[in-house]
Amino acid sequence: MGALDSPQRPAILCGPTLLLVLIVLLFSTFSIRLWYLQVYRYDFFAGRSQDNRTRQTTMFSPRGIIWDRNGVLLAENVPAYALALVREECPDIPRTLDQIALWTGLPRADLQKAFDLGKKRVKHFDEQVIVPNISFDLVATVEVHHQEWPGLVIVVRPKRYYAHGTELAHILGYVARANEAELHNDPTLQLGDDVGKQGLEVVLEQRLRGDKGLEEFEVDALGRVLASRVVSPPVAGEDFSLSVSLPLQQAAINALDNRAGAIVVMDADSGEILAQVSLPSYDPNEFVVGISQANWDALQDNELHPLQNRPVQSAYPPGSVFKLLIAGLALEKGLVSPTTSVYCTGKYTLGQREFRCWKRGGHGKVDLLKSLRESCDVYYYAAGERLGVDAIHDYALQCGFGEKTGLELPHERSGNIPSSAWKLKRFGERWQKGETLNFSIGQGHTLTTPLQIARFVGALVNDGHLLRPTLLRTTTPEIVGSLPMSAQTRKLILDAMVATVEEDQGTARLIRRPGVRVGGKTGTAQVVKLMEQYEKKKTHEIPYRFRDHAWLASFAEKDGRHYVVVVMIEHGGHGGADAGPVAGAVYDAIFNGQPGL
Amino acid sequence: MIDRRLFLHMNWWLLGLTAMLFCFGALNLYSASTLRAEDGLILDVYFNRQMIWGGISLAAMLGFMLVDYRHFKSAGPVFYGLAVFLLVCVAVFGKTISGSTRWLDLGLFNFQPTELAKIAVLVVGARMVSGVPERLGLWNLCKIVAMGFVPAALIAKQPDLGSALSIMLILAGIILYKGLTSTLFRVLAVLIPGVLPFGWFFLYDYQKQRILTFLDPNSDPLGAGYHVIQSQIAIGSGGFWGKGFMQGSQSQLRFLPEKHTDFAFAVFGEEWGLVGSVVLLSLFSAFLYQMYAVALEAKDEFGSCLAVGVFFYFFWQILINMGMTLGIMPVVGIPLPFISYGGSASVVNFCMIGMVLNVGMRRFVFKKN
């Protein structure tokens, strides 16, 4: 008998029995637990184990390239180096961020913000971009110190580059880092992706972007890749050829000579935009790498609004250019004929009010041709009074005003064509007859974009087709309507436009080009009712913001092709004298330069 | 002193089970210490080292078998004194390895006095308990606890909570085996659960974190909870038959941390499945049963208490380590005997078994006398 078999066997559990009970408990508890984990929950744990060993990585698809109409690269992808962090491998993240701040000179708080934003979206074993677009010097520095900073990696990602950024900023727009809302709305976007923010980049975003591919890796816990396979290959984004000609665009920019304004050059038959200038401009590449606060503030505070794409996003009173439309309506309604004439004494009286012609002394006897050639206001006061506001309104709408042209650019404005109903609704007042007179010479509440004017002039020369203008190369124009003018009416107006250029009394004589049939119409749109003190002054003597807008709408015909050139100089003074030479220079580039049209 | 007849009475079962467990451990370590690199397999140093330690352990075990265990009774206090002295030395001159000061640099090799303390406390504990004729009263209990508390406190200070805990648990096992007077038992049954929660305030932050993590591993899946979660994934994904030898993706691809030491059982469970795990569990159970048998047959109470002490020494380690890898116990750095890699632990394990074999084979010695 064992020595421990003491005479009084304990009532409470102790002695050898305790050991047996413990063995049984140990065995049964762990067997049950093993069964629970390995049989009952096998599927769950097998799945987790599989997830552990496979990782999926996005394969980037190159964004579509954009060329000009002759194959000059306008938007391309260049490699950019970014500093990224793999959280799992980084033993001391705050210290690493301190070091990055030291290297890059970026504020520590900004890095922390970038890190916190990404923490939610990037897996702990994936590369989380902290600083996009680092300099090559910094790449070298980081590579040298690579061993001391585990978890810090340099990633190479494609970056958008605009070789002629400033010259095409308003057409191409730009891409920039997708923001929180964009990431939220588009599940295919990942943190650090670039998306189109402006211009064609945003409008064509889905086609330019392509589809990302997916690659699956078998990895160990340190993230070392043991095997890989492509689950779905990346699909490159679509490439685009623009209708724009870079040399012509550059010539047009030079012609505008740093004045704020817009130029639209359009192929009247196809609707292709050959050049589209908006000045002042900006450098879209700054947005790609992340514009600095100072530069952003400068753009925002600039009174000339460089970000504004004037040809489509700005609407101005068309001034005398609008007379082309009134002439068309008057002819169509039979109100006037080519031989009908009005006597201009330099003023037109309506009730007690006097409406003056721009030519103080009057034009004398004015017929249709002369009214356009010399831009007589009185002729159109008379016509407008008889036509009435609502007839002009309806006709202007049929001519494509007051609505968007449908060009592939964002935030296009429709302008404004007033009517009596509009006035009542907008101001709660009845339309005054005098307003109709202002309306007839394109003043008052009438607002049109330079592109609408270009489309209208284009329809005059292309047999009356209102086209949808396009920035993309095309051979099949998209006709969206027809000009409500008979061929005869159009011919009369075109002839008058040619006379405006070809005859010495013509207001647009400065754009005359030998060997080419050119027609035009000038416009000098008042910004505010000119104050008395400025009346006799020259343009440069008047404060900038009170100066008139200078318009020139024109067409040229050569070798069966029709070009439309519309120039709008903001506060540029007189249509003929100021906008004329600009249009002339554009025609020089078209007919004498190497525009590659 | 050495009688050939002694070997006739040797508990061959215990020896055989020990050998089998050692082989299981070696096999598992072979798999766990393999690195899968791009250019094939590389065997890490752990396997070879463990084999060498196995040899040393075997010699140590023989040493502990051959000396009549009754000599331990008198030698115990000396070793105990030595162990406490060395632990004080460690506290003063110790060598710090990864945040804990546990080693004495003796020139030739690093010596960990903690291991000596475990054996010494066990022997002295058995001696103290076996000298009491009745069940333990308050005075005796206090003496025994105080004896264990001195080295345990020094070890806990290193800090090595796992070893300090095992020392106290070995004593607790022996005490429970011996039995307490009913009054004392009842008082303690109320008092200990009442006082235990206040122990929280004496824990280090990382120890608190482990307990919190045990309660909710998913609160920090990549930090403190990572071990527990990955361990359960490894074992659970092993399924019924296991993924096969050296095929466990959790361990081979290194998702499982400390796979050759504290979490070695997870590697085993992943590769051998429910079948292998239950076999291993059965071996451990049989192994413990044999120690129970030795305790039952021992000729004197000191021998019984020695065997019981060793029983608990292994029992607690199995309970805590397997419980931890299975996610039903908090993470405590206690290895699984024979399965986890560890040189000095292996030596101590074999010494402990040597003591039990010693008690077992001398169970008839008194009759001869």
Image: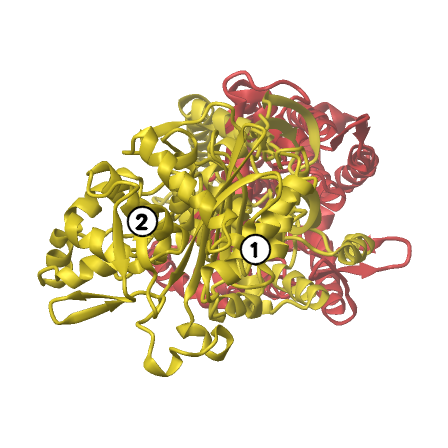
**Colour that chain B carries in the picture:** red
Classed neighbour count for the residue bearing mark 1: other residues with Cα under 10 Å, few (<14), some (14–19), many (≥20): many
Mark 1 sits on what residue?
A: A582
Image spot of residue A152 (x, y percent): 69, 52
Q: Chain of mark 2?
A: A
**Colour that chain A carries in the picture:** yellow
What mark, if any, has residue A367 been given in the picture? Answer: 2
Residue B177 is left or right of residue A333, and the answer is right
Secondary structure beneath dot 1 equals: helix
Q: Amino acid at mark 1?
A: Val
Residue found 47% across the figure and 39% down from its top: B327
What mark, if any, has residue B17 been given in the picture? Answer: none
In depth, the one of A159 and B180 nearer the eye is A159
Q: Chain of mark 1?
A: A
Image spot of residue A172 (x, y percent): 54, 45
Classed neighbour count for the residue bearing mark 2: other residues with Cα under 10 Å, few (<14), some (14–19), many (≥20): some
Q: Is residue B290 visible?
A: no
Residue A296 is left or right of residue B200, and the answer is right
Q: Is residue A337 visible?
A: yes
Could you give the CA–CA distance between mark 2 and mark 1, rounded to whole angstroms?
29 Å
Q: Residue furthest bottom?
A: A533
Residue found 34% across the figure and 29% down from its top: A487
In depth, the one of A515 and A84 nearer the eye is A515
Q: Amino acid at mark 2?
A: Asp
| Quarter assignment of residue A379 | bottom left
Residue found 50% across the figure and 24% down from its top: A46
